[in-house]
Image: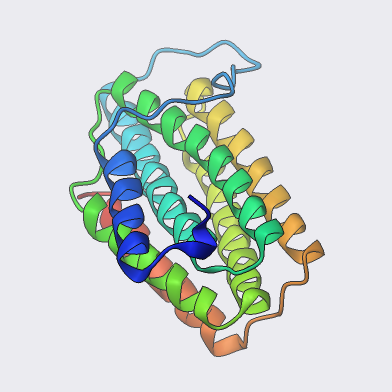
Amino acid sequence: MDPLSLTPVDRFLAGLDQARRALSSPPRAVRPKPLPALDATPLDDAQRREAGALMRVNHVGEVCAQALYSAQALATADPALRRQFERAAGEESDHLAWTAERLAELGARPSLLNPLWYAGAFGIGLLAARAGDATSLGFLIETERQVERHLEGHLERLPAGDQESRAIVAQMKDDEAAHAVAAEQAGAARLPAPIRWAMRAAAKVMTTTAHYV
């Protein structure tokens, strides 16, 4: 069904189905999981816990990305922009699958608050889209740039021997940068500074909480 012909009820049901798939269905990647360039070394218990906590935060980010792109794709009236959001969501689905698999390998669990994170991101995506396509793209750029910086920090914090997680995070970082460039080329508007500051504050709350819960 063409998203432009969806009724409000249809949109709500489509959002629920996307949420179900993001939160309960085993994620599947189209691209193979990135392989480490260097041999991994065994992790001790403390390193494994720290790597698991960091990858849990990254997994939360991908849950939010599914919600955000789903909301923006449903709300835009521009078919080309909708396809752009859907392509980006496909790459984020790879990230979701890779981080979920790595969590299992590390013996760590996803965040218990994933339904809350998803609902919040979906609502924010709808609000951004309602403000217009240029603003929606500007929100995407700011989000991706914040995520890129966040992933750069994780590359510094991950245990040196955890080459598997490092390979995943490095590829995710490259993809997020490409999404920001594509949004800029599509005509994104720069968000006002107070909105960017509020986004950073909200992201800080989410990443700090997801590290533990």
User: Which of these two is toward me, 141 or 78?
Assistant: 78
User: Which of these two is toward me, 150 or 1?
Assistant: 1
Look at the picture and state if 119 lies above or below 49: below
Q: Position of residue 116 (x, y in %)?
A: 23, 60
Q: What colour-coding does the image apply?
A: rainbow
Quarter where residue 96 is shown = top left
Q: Position of residue 169 (x, y in %)?
A: 55, 36
User: Which of these two is toward me, 131 or 92?
Assistant: 131
Q: How many marks?
A: 0
User: Which of these two is toward me, 88 or 110?
Assistant: 88
Q: Position of residue 126 (x, y in %)?
A: 44, 72
Residue projecting furthest to the right: 185
Look at the picture and state if 108 lies above or below 88: above
Would residue 160 be visible to someone looking at this image? yes
Task: From the viewer's perspective, tell me whether residue 160 is left or right of residue 99.
Answer: right
Residue at 33% in and 37% down: 50
Task: From the viewer's perspective, tell me whether residue 192 is left or right of residue 129.
Answer: right
Would residue 204 be visible to someone looking at this image? no
Quarter where residue 22 is shown = top left
Q: Position of residue 38 (x, y in %)?
A: 62, 14
Residue at 25% in and 30% down: 108
Task: From the viewer's perspective, tell me whether residue 182 is left or right of residue 145.
Answer: right
Look at the picture and state if 19 lies above or below 141: above
Residue at 53% in and 84% down: 195
